[in-house]
Amino acid sequence: MRVMVIVKATAESEAGVMPSPELLAAMGSYNEELVNAGVMLAGEGLKPSKHGARVLFSGKNRTVTDGPFADTKELIAGFWLWEVRSMEEAVEWVRRCPNPMTAESEIEIRPVFTPEDFGANMSPELAEQEEQLRRKLVQQGKNGA
């Protein structure tokens, strides 16, 4: 199963406080363990929300709001995409993670939908289209797992 592991933002990450060399080294070692175990598919840190934008969809209308965004608890500072056998395995990997922030922090784990999760709404044609796109991403050297 694929899971997205979401590192929640903190006041410090939103302020642009960079991790120490020691934390960067610890996270690098942790990421190396994930890669060597065949768990990590992708992972990145995100810049503070002041560099971002949100697009609100309301019918045919689109409203763009530039960052920063006030409510830090709803923001993310980084993510991983993992392939694991179970949610329990994902939790065990997160328990081993160095604290990604200088203060108290939170990491959320969410399963990624599979085509089967959509049941009858995913027609064979749509499933084939999805598979073709994934193959194309792999051919382009991008993560399409």
Image (spheres, helix red, strand yellow):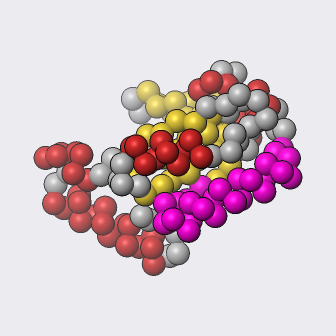
Which residue is farthest bottom? 139
* Residue 145 placement, left or right of 36: left
For residue 13, above or below residue 144: above
Residue 104 versus residue 131: which sits nearer the camera? 104
Does residue 68 appear in the picture of this structure? no
| Residue 21: x %, y % from top left | 86, 52
Tell me the residue at 56%/65% (across/down): 35
Residue 67 relative to residue 139: left or right: right
Please tell me whether residue 86 belongs to the stretch shown in magenta.
no
- Residue 84 on image: x %, y %: 41, 55
Q: Position of residue 131 (x, y in %)?
A: 30, 66
In the rendered image, the vertical position of residue 8 relative to residue 90, given as above or below: above
In the displayed structure, would residue 12 be above or below residue 110?
above
Q: Is residue 131 in view from this perspective?
A: yes
Is 40 included in the stretch rendered in magenta?
yes
Q: What is the magenta segment's predominant secondary structure?
A: helix
Residue under the point 36% across and 54% down: 85
136 and 29: which one is in front? 29
Give the position of the C terminus as an image quadrant: bottom left
Q: Residue furthest left?
A: 120
Q: Which residues are magenta?
A: 18-43
